[in-house]
Image: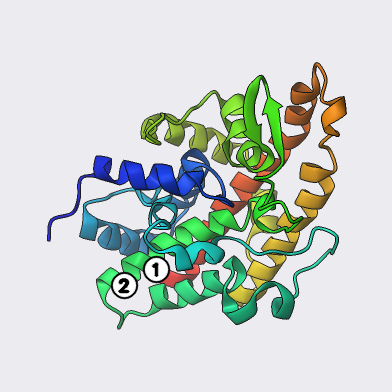
Amino acid sequence: MRRLPRFLLVPVIALAFAAPAMAWGPEGHAMIADIAQAHLDPAAAAQVRKLLALEGDTHLDQVSSWADAIRRDQPQTGPWHYVDIPLADRHYHAARDCKDSDCVVARIPYFAHILADRSASPARRLEALKWVVHLVGDIHQPLHAEDDHDKGGNDVKLDYFGRHTNLHRMWDSAVIEHALHVHVNRDYTFDHQVMRDRARKLDADITPAERLKWAPQSRDLHKDAVRWADGSHALARGVAYADLPPASKRTHGWSKRYQAEAWPVIKQRLQKAGVRLAAVLNQTLG
């Protein structure tokens, strides 16, 4: 069966991103994938190229939002993108937050295991690769590791730099777009070369000491995923919600002040996700 042209996926992607609890817009996921691909070991890079070639792709950023695009047709995958740690709590608890392993913390090691299995079919391993690329990005979005009974901030409506949006959408894309002067078209396409250029700049800002510090702390991917979720949750508590003024105080200049607080956090989350995704792929495919 011939692969559908990429433009035919646009309506699916558009509907997927309109659903609650999406993490990073396509530009964020693309930059994470680009940072990771630049740091793959030769063996892992060869495996990635071989798997991507099954569908005619060459870059991880071409598949980095695939998991969002399929959510309309596979709604059971929705909970895999996030973990609902109560905002009032401080840490992830598996029995409470990830029942039946139905959350991003459990799904990252699950799909990494499939990806590592050389006896699995190439098609199944490619699908697992797409999930790993996407979910490592998702777990680093602070609003994908919290639950404040507002659909991950989607119900927190506001105006940001004069545009009507919500708190989740701000952290997905609006802050990134404002900081890097990038945008996604109305049909959810974007300029891959522009995004790759932005990713190279983000990558160049990462120091060797930061790469070492941010790398996975063990070869137990589940333990690392728990740490990553707790890190995102702390930022949801300490920045995303804590720095958001009440609606009555969102007067002139509040967007600029919030941008100044949120962008350094988001920039580092994108960088950390890229570094960690590279490490996961190197460990899994090396």
Foreground of the two, 110 or 149 = 149
Relative vertical location of residue 47 with respect to residue 271 in this rendering, above or below: below
Foreground of the two, 144 or 59 = 144
Q: CA distance from mark 1 to mark 2?
A: 6 Å
Amino acid type, mark 1: Ala
Where the N terminus falls, by quadrant? bottom left
Residue at 29% x, 49% y is 58
Relative vertical location of residue 200 with respect to residue 249 in this rendering, above or below: below
Residue at 63% x, 27% y is 164
- The residue that mark 1 highlights is 128
Q: Are marks 1 and 2 in contact (CB under 8 Å)?
A: yes
Foreground of the two, 170 or 259 = 170
Q: Is residue 69 left or right of residue 180?
A: left
- The percent coordinates of residue 125 (x first, y second) are 33, 71
- Specify whether residue 281 is in view: no
- The percent coordinates of residue 279 (x first, y second) are 53, 62
Among the 4 quarters of the image, the one containing residue 97: bottom right
Residue 124 bears which disc, if any? 2
Disc 2 is placed on an element classified as helix
- The percent coordinates of residue 198 (x first, y second) are 50, 32
Residue furthest out toward the top: 252
Relative vertical location of residue 159 with respect to residue 1 in this rendering, above or below: above
